[in-house]
Image (cartoon, rainbow, N blue to C red):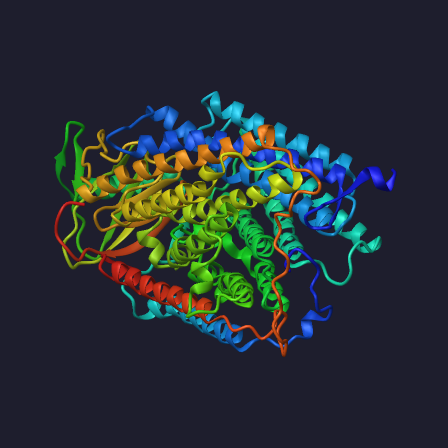
Amino acid sequence: MAIFPPAERIWWKQKVERVELLWIVIAFVWGIFMFLMMPYWHIYGKQNLSNEAYRIDPEVFAERAEAAADKYTVREEGDTGVPVVHPPPGSDAYLIARRWEWWPILEFEKGKSYRLHISSMDWQHGFSLQPTNINLQIHPGYEMVVTITPTEAGTF
Amino acid sequence: MTATTQFRVCPDSGLRIHRPAETLIKVNAVTAVVFLLIGGLFGISIALTRWPAVHLLPADWFYLALTAHGFDALLVWVIFFEIAILYFASALLLNSRLATPWLAWVAYALMLGGALLVNVIVLQGNSSVMFTSYVPMNADPLFYLGIIIFAVGALLGCCVFFGTLVIARDERTYKGSVPLVTFGAITAAIIAVFTIAAGAIILIPTMLWSMGYISYIDPLVYKVIWWGMGHSSQQINVAAHVAVWYAIGAMVLGAKPLSEKVSRSAYLLYILFLQLASAHHLMVEPGISSEWKIFNTSYAMYLAVLGSMIHGLTVPGSIEAAQRAKGYTKGLFEWLRKAPWGNPAFAGMFLSLVMFGFLGGISGVVMGVEQINLIIHNTIYVPGHFHATVVTGTTLAFMAITYLLIPLLFRREIIFKRLARWQPYIYGLAMGFVSLFMMGAGTLGVPRRDWDITGADALMSYDFPGAAYLMMGLNGVAASFAALGGALFIVIAVGSILFGKKRADDAPSILSPAAPAAVSSYGNAGTMQVPGTFVLALVFLGAFVLYYFVNWKYLAATWGLS
């Protein structure tokens, strides 16, 4: 029994029963399959996290974000006048995370791709786009760059 | 030290029990249950806050309670109980004296002191940084110190465990190899050493940073090393609760391992490959390569998951073998139908096995897939997963074995026996639903660690669909039942220890004799066929494969990201 030493002293030489061996093989094959799915998706799938990231000073990132906002603001929203920034398709968009907001509001065109740069001014922030449910972790001092392509129109 | 007064012989098992070891086991286990109560109280207050219609706690108290709940439930309750298991698996199962009991008491004092310190500091309100305390959020220096002290205590406990193994071998208190349960405990202790080292490496500098002696801690580096402690500590729990499953199978049904070789090899896979686990928490971080993420999140091509899947067959398989040898051979599942479901130790153990596998294991592997994590990270799906693993898995298994340890070590009968029969079902199933509802809400995007999902202060808030609110409400209801089940456990456990009828030395044994062995041609438990278990394993695999591909489908429906 499991609470006593093994009944057969030389337990490591016992043959393994067929059912157990079969299960081990099945489980192993499934594991390898799951492992290979990840590189497969990197090649053929449309959702992957890019590996592009840079160390950056929060002030520098803020300057770039504000510069982009100045260039491409199309209107403002809300009492505090948050800019709505509409960058040209294929270009760089900047998003700042800080307590307690994401800034600015970005306006993208459906079916077009954008290089989205995200960084935090202060703490770690959880970026969560709903209802699409894309979630990223944003760090201060690190700039994450992802190429994002909205496939639907709406407010997110 | 006289041999006779230092030891007693267990009337149920025949094992030679070292009295100082037994005292330490009892004290650590009781302390564990006290912190389970504290952690549970914080837990129910959190569930009732995340239930939008109830919204019990105000925001600052919510984050405070969440920090405390994480620490007390995930670290303190579980590790105190595991220290008890370590001493049990070494001194008691090996008929040996415990190495340096005085050091084990020092370890206990450090763990208790550290745990109390952290709780006091968190209750002061300035350290609501979550149990993960992500830099650059700053907690009180004593917060970090308390965790470090607790961890040092646990490490010393592991040292006492290893020392006991050496002594037992040296003094030849047992013949041959250590029992499988002890082997599992060794696995847990080895992983614990690595885990605590990782924790010390990151928390000592972080404490110095919070005191102003170090100017900067890189937030990415912090996460990589912290999760070397954070997730690896969960693997300690897996090794420990699997050992508990085997122990309960043996004690209640006389089950023998189908193959000592297979089960021990599966534990070895844990030791070799589980340490890569911190990657699970870093799937959607900047600055870490996909290659690193893919290799580590899969625990080196899922070799450690293979270990769990093996135990998932061999644990119920050993029970089926024992039951069939006793005559329950009708059809595929008579062995299961006629199993002692009225015995709370067995019920808790089997529920723990099924829910850990189906709810916890499958969700864990799926959300650890590098790309699928995009739709999972920071949602309340994550707590859904880990309540399945560490609550319906580890906690329920530990509750189950308590029903055996109280009669065996405290020599008391269990009180409220009828209620005790129901307790694992109430707690286990309710917690299973808690997990399911949290996972459901998370699939709809509901965030974790968030006091208010209506986003009331935001310029552009998002209206979660009604189903999400429904899930959070149902979660609150399920958690209330689970709290009832938890309270019941505490009342029964503490009540039995204090007021249970004392068991005389000649009381009938509560342990099952070893199940009769059939004619043995190969394998340790005879040539036992376990078709029922194999069918269950295939059902598990089917569910796994289905759920895996369903989540790829969900991912493919989102925007393009590269």
Q: Residue B390: x percent and y percent?
A: 47, 46
Q: Residue B75: x percent and y percent?
A: 53, 39
As drawn, is A75 to the left or to the right of B403?
left
Residue A80 vs B70, above or below: the answer is above
Q: Quadrant of residue B199?
A: top right
- State whether residue B83 appears in this view: no
Instruction: Work out which residue is located at the far right of the displayed protein and give it.
Output: B2
Q: Nearer the viewer, residue B77 or A43?
A: B77
Q: Nearer the viewer, residue B283 or B242?
A: B242
Q: Nearer the viewer, residue B281 or A118?
A: B281
Q: Quadrant of the N terminus of chain B?
A: top right
Q: Quadrant of residue B141?
A: top right
Q: Nearer the viewer, residue A44 or B70?
A: B70
- State whether residue A133 appears in this view: yes
Instruction: Work out which residue is located at the far top of the displayed protein and give it.
Output: B124
Q: Quadrant of the C terminus of chain B?
A: bottom left
Q: Residue B352: x percent and y percent?
A: 46, 51
Residue visible at 65% across and 37% down in the picture: B503
Q: Residue B313: x percent and y percent?
A: 50, 65
Number of numbered discs overlaid on the protein picture? 0
